[in-house]
Image (spheres, helix red, strand yellow):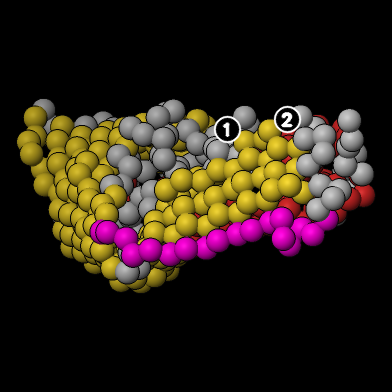
């Protein structure tokens, strides 16, 4: 029985691998295009405290974490500008990335790299948000901003093929490949009110009513591929089918409860995206890209004739998406100059950064006059272990906040992602 000469098979395989790489990586470009959350207002203070904001957030930040806290927000504030960016993968830490980049990978290195990638595949998540002007007057707030998020996954077998090639007599399947991304603007009206006061304790409720203006949405309707290497030939087939739209409109509703006790303990409960709907109806396209290769062997060395691809675009029908629903339970209190906060976040589906695996977040703020250093940590959920640090600066009415968060590891070298945020506001 004949086999394919190594130099011929390697040349064909390398070209085919490049084509398949371009196809499969296209699914992850969705991450760069772009919503797991539709909040655009600054999350900076809570980010510095590990992400715990369900009970401690006040003023404009209550819009992001619990609108019921507006019932206990005094004075007024104006959000001038803010931005937050977060990117994370599920496999490679910063140290591992630096270790393998630009080096030759031997058998042990390849085995270690494959063990770094979970069985579900290599995933990448990104979240970008920017806040424009926001206004808070007592228990009422009006905010506006933009959000872009995306997430995608590449089947682990894809990396097996890239590192080791396809063993003779086996078929490699890339079917666990998917992605989703969107970008939208949001305008939110928020209100909080006290429901009752009993024994010095007060219970408040709040709601966010959000109008969503869709800018772009794309998701993978289906994707997959196989490579089969026989003794005499290589065959392959791969496809990515996407559905996209260049505009739409929708709404989102968050509801919350907040409790304040005479001893200073604060408790908050929020249901994010209790109701939501987004109709994408502008320039809807269904795109189908397919790559196939057949009878690549010693007798048929013309790879251009053996490999074919097709890229077809159809006009699609309007479609509707929803934002992922999650719940947040938080508590906070003050001990001397320290503000302590902790949250429990529970998602109701696995989608992007929302997970059915609970996430616990905790942090502290040290109130030192015009400076407020912040530190925190979190564990669980999609993001895994993380550590954070932040700083708030008060200059009269002017507030400046900044924060940095590790993703997937407590130490910088162990982190598999990073988040940074900065915001400026006026507080009266």
Kindly report which numbered mark, 1 or 2, lies closer to the viewer in this rendering: 2
**Counting residues from the N terminus, which is met first, the one under dot 1 or under dot 2?**
1
- Which numbered marker is on residue 57? none
For residue 103, side relative to residue 32 (left or right) = right
Instruction: Answer yes or no: is residue 127 visible.
Output: no
For residue 34, side relative to residue 420 (left or right) = left
Task: Say whether marks 1 and 2 touch (CB < 8 Å).
Answer: no
Q: Secondary structure at mark 1?
A: loop
Q: Which of these two is toward me, 399 or 57?
A: 57
Residue 304 at x, y percent in the picture? 73, 62
Image position of 196 with respect to 150: above or below: above
Residue 329 at x, y percent in the picture? 31, 32
**Mark 1 — residue?**
120
Residue 26 at x, y percent in the picture? 57, 57
Residue drawn 68% across the image and 41% down it: 227
Q: Quadrant of residue 155?
A: top right
Magenta segment: 301-318
How many dots with numbers? Answer: 2
Q: Secondary structure at mark 2?
A: strand
- Which numbered marker is on residue 170? 2
Residue 297 at x, y percent in the picture? 81, 47
């Amino acid at each position: 029985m004949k086999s394919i000469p190594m130099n011929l098979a390697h040349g064909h395989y390398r070209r085919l691998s490049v084509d398949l790489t371009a196809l499969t990586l296209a699914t992850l470009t969705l991450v760069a295009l772009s919503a797991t959350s539709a909040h655009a207002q600054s999350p900076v203070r809570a980010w510095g405290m590990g992400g715990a904001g369900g009970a401690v957030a006040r003023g404009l930040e209550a819009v992001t974490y619990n609108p019921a806290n507006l019932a206990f927000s005094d004075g007024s504030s104006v959000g001038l500008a803010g931005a937050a960016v977060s990117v994370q993968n599920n496999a490679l830490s910063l140290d591992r990335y630096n270790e393998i980049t630009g080096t030759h990978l031997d058998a042990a290195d390849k085995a270690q790299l494959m063990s770094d990638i979970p069985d579900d595949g290599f995933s990448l998540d990104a979240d970008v948000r920017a806040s424009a002007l926001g206004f808070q007057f007592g228990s009422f707030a009006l905010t506006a901003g933009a959000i872009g998020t995306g997430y995608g996954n590449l089947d682990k077998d894809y990396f097996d093929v890239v590192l080791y090639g396809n063993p003779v007599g086996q078929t490699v399947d890339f079917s666990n490949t998917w992605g989703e991304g969107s970008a939208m603007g949001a305008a939110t009206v928020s209100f909080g009110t006290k429901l009752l006061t009993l024994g010095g304790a007060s219970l408040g409720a709040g709601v966010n009513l959000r109008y969503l203006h869709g800018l772009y949405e794309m998701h993978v309707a289906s994707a997959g591929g196989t490579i089969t290497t026989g003794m005499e030939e290589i065959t392959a087939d791969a496809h990515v089918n996407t559905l996209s739209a260049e505009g739409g409109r929708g709404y989102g509703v968050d509801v919350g409860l907040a409790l304040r006790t005479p001893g200073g303990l604060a408790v908050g409960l929020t249901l994010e995206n209790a109701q939501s709907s987004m109709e994408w109806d502008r320039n809807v396209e269904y795109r189908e890209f397919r790559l196939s290769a057949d009878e690549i062997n010693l007798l048929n060395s013309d790879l251009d004739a053996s490999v074919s691809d097709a890229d077809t675009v159809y006009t699609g029908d309007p479609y509707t998406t929803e934002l992922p629903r999650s719940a947040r339970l938080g508590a906070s209190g003050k001990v001397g100059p320290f503000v302590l906060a902790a949250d429990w976040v529970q998602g109701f589906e696995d989608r992007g950064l929302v997970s059915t695996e609970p996430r616990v977040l905790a942090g502290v703020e040290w109130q030192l006059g015009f400076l407020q250093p912040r530190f925190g940590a979190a564990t669980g959920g999609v993001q895994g272990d993380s550590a954070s640090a932040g700083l708030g600066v008060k200059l009269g009415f002017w507030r400046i906040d900044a924060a940095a968060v590790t993703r997937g590891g407590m130490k910088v070298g162990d982190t598999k992602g990073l988040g940074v945020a900065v915001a400026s506001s006026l507080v009266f």
